[in-house]
Image (tube, rainbow, N blue to C red):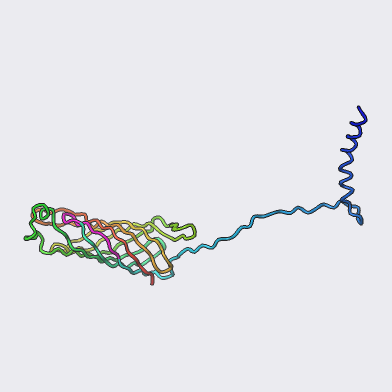
Amino acid sequence: MTRFSIATLFTLMASPLLWANDNLNEDTGNVQINPIVVVEPNEEVREQYEAQIDTEFFELGAYMGVLAIEDFGSSTVTGLKASFHATEDFFLQANYGQAEAGLSTAEYYFDNQTTSIIPDRNYEYYNLLVGYNLFPGETFITQNLTLNSTFYVVAGAGNTDFAGDNHFTLTFGSGYRIILTDWLTWNMDFRDHSFDTQIGAKEKRTHNLEFSLGLTAFF
């Protein structure tokens, strides 16, 4: 082994001893270890507002939409609704709506507008429904705005006044509710109003489909 190699080996072996000697505490003779500094990311907590239903159980509002009256086309429907939230999942809902029927299929194709096949074209209904909040969840409007929402189903019965007669009506449907504030909600509803009617010589069960949008307030 050459002299240069021996000198290099001794230099490497002496380096830790020299480093330890430099870090000796002159008073105690112990090795002074520098503290480890942990750098943590600056996490900023973002505040979010999430609307909640207020503590009241009663809900009142109005709605407007389209009612497809079987054999008489589609008409604008307006109405009022009132709900009582018995539990977190179940609620009772009362509805009143009205519309005006258009021309029947025969009147439209044969242009017979002078003679009506029904004595009265006013369509009015009221019903009492039982609702169930099937899928409660959240709706993300923007990155910073999240609103509570729920998808629900309803079923019940009521009465329909149409074509000069009263008809016992079964109503089934579903809806989607978004809670805008702690007292105001936006609703989208779909209903099927089904009843037996006799226009002319034939009696049949009709299905009158309704789609509506509305606002309700808790009190």
- Image quadrant in which you'd find residue 192: bottom left
The percent coordinates of residue 203 (x first, y second) are: 12, 54
Quick one: 202 or 79, which is closer to the camera?
A: 79
Q: Nearer the viewer, residue 130 or 113?
A: 113
The stretch drawn in magenta includes residue 141: no
Is residue 194 in view? Answer: no
Compared to 158, does 15 lie above or below? above
Please identify the residue farthest to the front as the structure is shown.
Answer: 4
- Residue drawn at point x = 61 percent, y = 58 percent: 43
Question: How many numbered tags mark residues here?
Answer: 0
* Lateral position of residue 111 relative to residue 94, left or right: left
Q: Position of residue 8 (x, y in %)?
A: 88, 35
- Write the residue at 17% across / 61% down: 101
Q: Residue furthest bottom?
A: 219
Q: Where's residue 15, x and y in %?
A: 87, 42
- Position of the N terminus, as image quadrant, is top right
Q: Residue furthest right?
A: 3
Q: Which residue is pictured at 46% across the width and 58% down the height? A: 142
Q: Residue furthest left?
A: 115
Residue 96 is left or right of residue 39, and the answer is left
**Residue 197, quarter of the rendered image:** bottom left
Query: Could one spot residue 136 in this view of the protein?
Result: yes
Residue 24 is situated, as x and y percent measured from the top left of the image, at 89, 51
Please, is residue 97 above or below residue 13 in the view? below
User: Taking 189 as reference, is 135 left or right?
Assistant: right
Front-lying residue, 152 or 176: 176
Q: Is residue 64 magenta?
A: yes
Specify the segment rendered in magenta: 63-73
In the rendered image, the quadrant that contains the C terminus is: bottom left
